[in-house]
Amino acid sequence: MSLDYAVHHVHSIHISLRRSRLTMLNPCFSLGGMPQNWRFAEALQKTAPLLSSNHANFIHVKDSFFHTSRFAHCNFIYIVVITEQMTVPGLHPIHVNFKQETKTMMLQHEITEALSHRPTKVWSGEPLLGSSYGQEEIDAAVNCIRESMDPTVGFGFSAPPIPDFEQAFAKYCGAKYATAVNSCGPAIDIIMRYLKLQPGDEVIVPSCNYVASPLSVYGHGGQVIWGDVLPDTLQLDPEDVERKMSPRTRAIFPVHMNGLAAPIDDYIAIAEKHPHPVHGPAKVISDAARACGGGYKGNKIGKAGWATVFSFHTMKNMTTLGEGGMITTDDPDLDKFAHSVRMYGIDINAWGTSNVMTKVQAAVGLVQLSKLDSFIDGRRRIAHARNRMLADVPGLILPVEPADCYHSYYLYTCRVKDEWAGAKRDELMATLDKEFGFRCVIANPPVYAGRKQLAEHTRGQSNPVTEHLAKTIFCVPLHPDMPEADNKYICAAIITAMSRL
Ligand SMILES: Cc1ncc(COP(=O)(O)O)c(C=O)c1O
């Protein structure tokens, strides 16, 4: 259940989704934040009908102190964290998501039961097909082939349904324009080409990242500047970005890491604060290869920032027959450039090669796009069930979803506590693979750890958070069609394997 309420007179609030320690209460809501004072609780009760029911109560949580006895009769608990340092400058309305969190960590008999149903599929942390296909995709592909078989029609020249797919995708994201390409890598290259990077021009990219964006910056003659990431979300750390801004910074290039939105507005504000002397504020480009269908501040990813790139590769949230990509932007000049250079620079006399998407891919893409929200719902259902089953497993840190994000759970990114970094995390992953039969992935170690030329190119730069995360993260298999029994098995296996560490 997820409810939205407009709450007035609140400066800021963060939904923590922590599980209550009140084990006798079920289900339980957990709400952490920084309300101004106790009047906040009253305001919530007035604003949100659900909260004023007899079952609702507020607990003042300070230093993790719970007045449990007062609430033993309640079905629902709302936990309001009140902090001393809360100030009340311009009060303004905000939206609060209340998310039900029924608990609890699996009990021993549930673990035993779950482990008796070993999945028939061998799941991996990044399943080889990220979406799912039905008769609709098959029909769309076959129809497109039939229509194109006519010698006066053919398959080429970015003909319909490619523009239809672009328009539908732009509309879905809330962007003005979209350019379909053959994969996300060329989408990034096209944007780098547009920037016309000169030697010494800098682009800040996260060090916890796939190789695509840094390689493109490097390949187009720019200087890669690694930005470190936030340990709980794996997103490019705005404070580190600000430290690394220089008069040569041309672009900030975050990744919406593992399905969760990066804080784009923070990077835009930083870019505006430190404009390039010739080109003005650094462009904020974001890599949503792993986050198609995710949300940021009430919009879909693909709206905020100057340009966003997407991947429809076989493992992604939506797929176009194995490969495919898209660029979204509100900038008509970039859109014109992208449409031209994906086909040898037609119209603008610019250098280009062929990066076109095929008509059949676009036909399938239209169907996949119409199903994307249901794929994300499926991912979220699995992730939320897992959050409950794995709540409070000692030493395990679960993925977080900041209040202004709508996680698409491309990956279910867990961490082990610091004491288990390295060997114990590796031992856990090996046990899950060898004994329990499913594979987790580390997404991602520092890019330079695996690419010599990037390590040499960025010699002397260090990213302590990313380097440490590489020893603690492990991404657990998740797929929108994963059966509930497989999800339970995976959780039971993690609890069992972790209890042995
Ligand atoms: C973050 C990120 N960016 C870019 C890409 C490249 O996408 P594509 O395979 O469509 O070129 C990937 C692919 O896995 C990725 O994970």
Image (tube, rainbow, N blue to C red):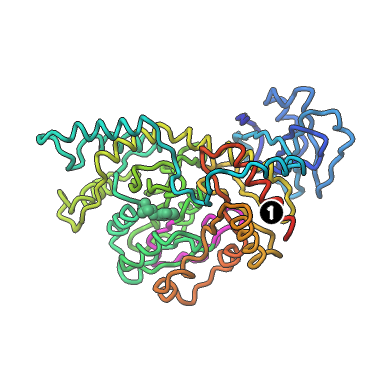
In the visual, does 487 lie left or right of 113?
A: left
Where does residue 253 sit, x and y in percent of width and height? Answer: 42, 57
Q: Quadrant of the N terminus?
A: top right
Residue at 20% x, 56% y is 352
- Can residue 50 be found in the magenta stretch? no
Q: Can residue 12 be spotted in the picture?
A: no
Which sits in the foreground, 458 or 435? Answer: 435
Q: Which residues are magenta?
A: 229-253
| Front residue of this view, candidates 435 and 497 | 435
**In the displayed image of the protein, which residue is found farthest to the right?**
69
Q: Is 43 placed above or below 245 here?
A: above
Q: Quadrant of residue 131?
A: top left
The quadrant where residue 110 appears: top right
Dot 1 alpha-carbon crowd within 10 angstroms: few under 14, some 14 to 19, many 20 or more: many
Residue 479 vertical position relative to residue 446 in the rendered view, above or below: above
**Disc 1 target residue:** 396
Quarter of the picture containing the C terminus is bottom right
| Amino acid of disc 1 | Leu
Q: Give ligand 1's quarter of the image.
A: bottom left
